[in-house]
Amino acid sequence: MAKRAKNIALVCPGGPITRDLAKELGEIAADHCESAATLHFHEQCFLQAGHFAGTDAERSAAFLEVANDPKMDAVWFARGGYGAGRLDNDLYENLNEAARGKTYLGYSDAGVILARLHGLGIGKSVHGPMATDLVRVDGHAAMRRALDFLVAGKKSHCEPAAMRAPSYAFNITVLAHMIGLDWAPEFSGRIVMLEDVGEYLYRIDRAMQAIITSPKMSGAAGIMLGRISDVPENDRPFGADAEEIARYWCDRAGVDFLGSADIGHDSDNKIVPFLNDDEIDQDAANNVVQFSRRSRT
């Protein structure tokens, strides 16, 4: 499980945050964690270069700096939004031993970084709330959940299935775009949890085709579907909802559909650590087959 964090660095691999949001989150952390943890917002979080929180070079340098800083225990991605995939490829080769001891927390577009780090065996990649979730309804609860995990290592805030078997959690669109890359993760023996926001159902169908039929999915323990929210209305009905789409592609590819996952672009988004086999609760792991069979019925 993740190392407990006292000093937490925040950077923005995609879009920026405001100083007001940083101030509010700092106050929440001070109140909730008291002296147990301190948030350190990198100045890069507040830069602007078009869509992005600074240029690719500035965002890459900020991430490398905090990841390699031995004084920091964790890196918390403050915001998603497109941009993580544009970071300098070479930075991953320049991560030091300090980077290997950290927890990295985020989701959505930050899944690109989480996947690369996990594949390289660097630190602990964790899907979970980001600073900008503070502006959502019940956003304070999401911040406390993230802080409880980072600072106190609370497993009670994790999606339960992630304790049953090694699991990954990704945004559907992000995973569909990266699954064909050389460094994309292999899913053999893994539960793959998927969520999305703001996509037409036909785009969800197209992305699920790319994911489910990829050779990287060979031997996967199964698919769980998180929330597919804010779906735009097309000019004609697609004819299937998100779960029916997921079941269709799972059935077609012979991948188990394992039911619902409590993840999504909302304040209820649960935490999914990318655990290895030796980190799983073995009593829970023994129930994976039974869990799979119940979910398919």
Image (spheres, rainbow, N blue to C red):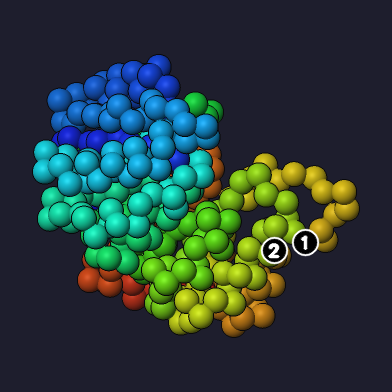
Q: Which amino acid does label 1 sit on?
A: Ala
The x, y position of residue 171, in whole percent, is 52, 54
First in sequence: mark 1 vs mark 2:
2
The x, y position of residue 29, in whole percent, is 28, 26
Q: To which quarter of the image does residue 129 belong?
A: top left
The x, y position of residue 235, in whole percent, is 87, 48
Left or right placement of residue 284 versus residue 202 in this view: left
**Residue drawn at the location 59% of the way across and 51% of the way down:** 196
Instruction: Say which residue label 1 marks.
Output: 240
Left or right placement of residue 164 versus residue 133 in this view: left
Residue 242's place in the image compared with 135, above or below, is below
Instruction: Say which residue label 2 marks.
Output: 205
The x, y position of residue 68, in whole percent, is 17, 46
Q: Quadrant of the C terminus?
A: bottom right
Q: In which quarter of the image is the N terminus?
A: bottom left
Find numbered disc 2 in the image and state the secondary structure of the residue it sits on.
Answer: helix
**Residue drawn at the location 36% of the way across and 30% of the way down:** 45
Residue 47's place in the image compared with 156, above or below, is above
